[in-house]
Image (tube, grey):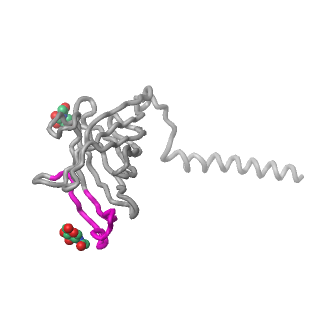
Amino acid sequence: MAQTLINLALLYLFLFSLIVAPTKADSFSRNLSPKTLGLKREKLSHLHFYFHDTLSGENPTAVPVAQAAMTNKSSTSFGLVVMIDNPLTVKPEVNSEQVGRAQGIYASASQSEVSFFMAFNLFFTEGKYNGSTLSLLGRNSIFSGIREMPIVGGSGLFRFARGYAKAKTYMVNLKTNDAIVEYNVYVFHY
Ligand SMILES: *[C@@H]1O[C@H](CO)[C@@H](O)[C@H](O)[C@H]1NC(C)=O
Ligand SMILES: *[C@@H]1O[C@H](CO)[C@@H](O)[C@H](O)[C@H]1NC(C)=O
């Protein structure tokens, strides 16, 4: 008798799940084959360019937009936020061929050393990558030799991108804080 009741209960649960379950999970998500999106083999790409951070002159591309009351007293400019639309070029000279822009913000985020929180898009404007972007989010301790920052995603040809960028200061003017930074970026994408 008890066994029959258990069997009935199980049968009831089974029938109930048939009615309820599909409407719950299937209505907004499904599994896809990567082929559906035309994704073939994952590739590894290396990009090399120079980043021009120009705060001085008539046409700055890096503009301080906010700071805290204590920022001027901080030896690390803690709290300073800078908006950028910096050109990316193939050679260190700012007038060399431009391949894209770095658009976003960096902000002084350490009270013990000059270290920036970097959050910007690398927007490419040349060749097959024209219109594609890579998103960078990382920590940049600017007086260290080589800084590594994660690439957390991308768009266009860089969909599903992930990887890292290595930044090395090529030139810095300590009066104006203008800098040219060499970037080597390594990304997996399709
Ligand atoms: C910090 O210094 C700059 C220029 O040196 C000045 O324009 C700004 O008003 C100062 N900010 C504060 C919060 O004192
Ligand atoms: C990049 O794409 C934009 C928008 O589609 C277009 O106006 C521009 O001419 C393209 N540049 C190059 C170098 O192909």
Name which quarter of the figure residue 55 lies in.
Answer: bottom left
Residue 190 place in picture, x, y as percent: 40, 31
Residue lying at the far top of the rendered structure: 41
Residue lying at the far bottom of the rendered structure: 69
Asked if residue 181 can be seen in this view, the reply is yes
From the viewer's perspective, tell me whether residue 125 is left or right of residue 48. Answer: left
Residue at (22% x, 34% y) in the render: 91
Q: Is residue 166 magenta?
A: no
Residue at (23% x, 29% y) in the render: 127
Report the front residue among 44 and 181.
Answer: 181
Part of the protein shown in magenta = 60-82
Asked if residue 125 can be seen in this view, the reply is no
From the viewer's perspective, tell me whether residue 65 is left or right of residue 159. Answer: left
Looking at the image, residue 12 lies above or below residue 159: below
Report the front residue among 165 and 147.
Answer: 147
Residue 180 place in picture, x, y as percent: 24, 44
Residue 36 place in picture, x, y as percent: 43, 31
Q: Is residue 78 magenta?
A: yes
User: Count of labels shown?
Assistant: 0
Residue lying at the far right of the rendered structure: 1
Residue at (44% x, 26% y) in the render: 41
Residue at (12% x, 52% y) in the render: 59
From the viewer's perspective, tell me whether residue 84 is left or right of residue 157. Answer: left
Residue lying at the far left of the rendered structure: 58
**Quarter, ligand 2:** top left
Report the front residue among 163 and 174.
Answer: 174
